[in-house]
Amino acid sequence: MEVKLAEFFIALAVFFSITIVASNRLFLGIKSYALQSLSIAAATTLIASIENISHLFVSALLMLIVKACIIPLLLFYVTKKLNIQRKIETNVTIFDSVIFCALIVVFSYFLVAKFNLSSRVLGFNVIPLSISVIIIGLFIMVTRRKAITQILGFLTLENGIFMAEIASTHGMPVFVELGIFMDVLIGVIIAGIFVYRMSETFNDIDTEKLTSFKE
Amino acid sequence: MELIVLLFIPLLGMVASFLPKREYAFLVLSGIDLGIGVEICRKVLEEGRIFALSNYLFADSLSVLLILIITVLSFLAGIYSIPYLSAENVNEKAKSKFYFLINAFIFSMLLTAVSNNLGILWVGIEATTLSTAFLVSFYKNPPSLEAGWKYLIICSVGIAFALFGIVILFFSVAPYLGYEADVLNWTNLMSAATSNKININLAKLAFAFALIGFGTKMGLAPMHTWLPDAHSQAPSPVSALLSGVLLNCAAASILRIGNVLGATGEKEIVSNLLIFFGTLSVFLAGLFLLKQKDYKRMFAFSSMEHMGLIAMSSGFGGMGIFAAMFHMLNHAFTKSLLFMSAGNVLCSLHTREIEKIRGLFKTMPITAFLLGLGTLAITGTPPFNIFSSEFLIITSGFVTHHLWAVGIALAGLTMVFAGLGFHVTKMLFGEPSFEGNREVSFIQLLTPVILLIIVLVGGIYMCQPVEELLNDIQNNVLRFV
């Protein structure tokens, strides 16, 4: 029962990564990210109690504090402060993107079946789902043009890797996990400062306008 | 104990960057760190591997090689930064930021060099990206912001792939060894691999991800796109460190993971992938280098070429490893020499464009001399050190019958020689485009002169400790690549 529930939360995380793709407003994307992190934290807590692994509780708590609260708040703050146009600009229409995401999920199942990567901890579904979150994260980074949405794409990718970690190896060792969380948090702060400076210098954060190094 | 002190000193330097005499504090601290590095080298040569912090930190001959490159170059960069920053009229607040970040950068590189644990290594490599992102965009002008953003995003994604690779590697050994933290230690991974307690298919997948991920950081084509921008926009002492040291740290991580896979008996795939990406990088770097308009960018492409050579040569295995490690050492010093002489030109003439600079021999004679000899050295002209290591690389390629790879790499090297020779000759000779004597101060010339001496001596004479280190890397540390 609990295993099923954990899998449900993992599936919910995939759903929220698709809502990031589907959102046409920055705030909606950031909220989806927060909810995604929240559901991963819930899944982690469940796995920790099923398998009785104490350090996974730490990871779940960090997930809740850092990725479901601090990082979304930081992104909200940057978006508000910049007063940028909050519409998300895309290279691929939202409709096409969502269809594409569905294909990504199918493709991940195919990949996992091919490499025989089944999870030892949870059911068969978790590894393919986490790989699809990783690929969806990359997809967001490639197709969305605003600098903030690129950060969101990176964070989604990172969440996918976290899901793969908890499903395959009960998470990384605890001090490594701490280091990863710290790196991600500092990375988001630095990226936020970059976004702020770029909006001051270029009057925009559309990355299509960064073209001084064309080869 | 030495290892902990080695890591602690840059942390102290981060604090010291808030003091008024921060330049000199940095110089003193990096000098001490250099001393500790030499002591670690001596100890490793005498006693073999040393461990610290319940085996999470260690130093073998590969780490010692990296430690020596990092500490020597950061000390020299410390000397060079003092006149450089004052010539650029950098204010006190920015100076404080500069020294804070450069200490963080050195700390994270040392951490990757001495970490026994793959997880800590990953944290260290990601920290190098974070600490240098603001150094790349130090001048806050539009191109440097763009370069910094590109660097941050591309390298973070690359490193995330490497993390995924590490997770898979953990997954491949965990069923046999358990889920404890020290399973990720190199020493345990190696014994698991040699005793076949590893899922080989997963290990292959892990190596592929690690190669893509750390390869991004190392500047292998086609993941190199951040490298020329970041290296050309950063202040020159930082360019020297980025190019001379950081790329090597990433290269060492790839080779260590490749060594784990190689120990399972899957040598072939490691060497083929390394040779493929290496050769591709050398060739593409040659093509791009021909049409560059910015001289710092041109030297950045040359870094990409040399990283390609290192990857290719490691793929040859055996003597190739010796050659690759020797090349790593030589490239670090030679490229720093070039970036610092280019920094002198930029500092005095304030332009990055090759077209606008003519007749450097008349306006800046000593810098022109350094730049000219440095270019000869980096393109592999005898009697400089790069010649001997490139000669070894080519020889080991022929010995192991990789004729195609060597052929393509030689074509790339020829293009690099033509490109660098053509552009730099134009800058050095002809009617001066600037008037009067524009030579920089004595102290700003001191560091490149020291580096030139090292480069020249390294080409003629190989001192014994270095030879022992390189032999040990070939025969013990990276024996399975």
Image (spheres, coloured by chain):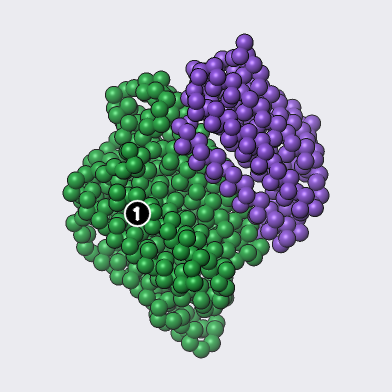
Chain colours: A purple, B green
Percent x, y of residue A89: 78, 44
In the rendered image, the quadrant that contains the C terminus of chain B is: top left
Percent x, y of residue B302: 45, 58
From the viewer's side, name the closer residue of B414 and A152: A152
Tell me which chain the residue with mark 1 is part of.
B
Q: Give the image quarter of residue B171.
A: top left
From the viewer's side, name the closer residue of B267 and B449: B449
From the viewer's side, name the closer residue of B465 and A175: A175
Identify the residue at horizontal 54%, vertical 78% (top origin): B349
| As drawn, B48 above or below A13 | below
Q: Residue furthest top?
A: A1
| As drawn, B390 above or below B166 | below
From the viewer's side, name the closer residue of A165 and B320: A165
The residue under label 1 is which amino acid type? Leu
Identify the residue at horizontal 37%, vertical 30% (top origin): B183
Lateral position of residue B192 relative to residue A77, left or right: left
Identify the residue at horizontal 63%, vertical 33% (top origin): A64
Percent x, y of residue B402: 33, 41
Q: Which residue is mark 1?
A: B6
Count of all numbered marks drawn on residues in the image: 1
Identify the residue at horizontal 37%, vertical 75% (top origin): B446
Label 1 SS? helix
| As drawn, B380 above or below A43 | below
Percent x, y of residue A215: 60, 55
Is any atom of residue A114 visible in this view?
no
Q: Pointer 1: residues within 10 angstroms few (<14), some, or many (20+)?
A: many
Is any atom of residue A199 visible in this view?
yes
Lateral position of residue B424 relative to residue A69, left or right: left
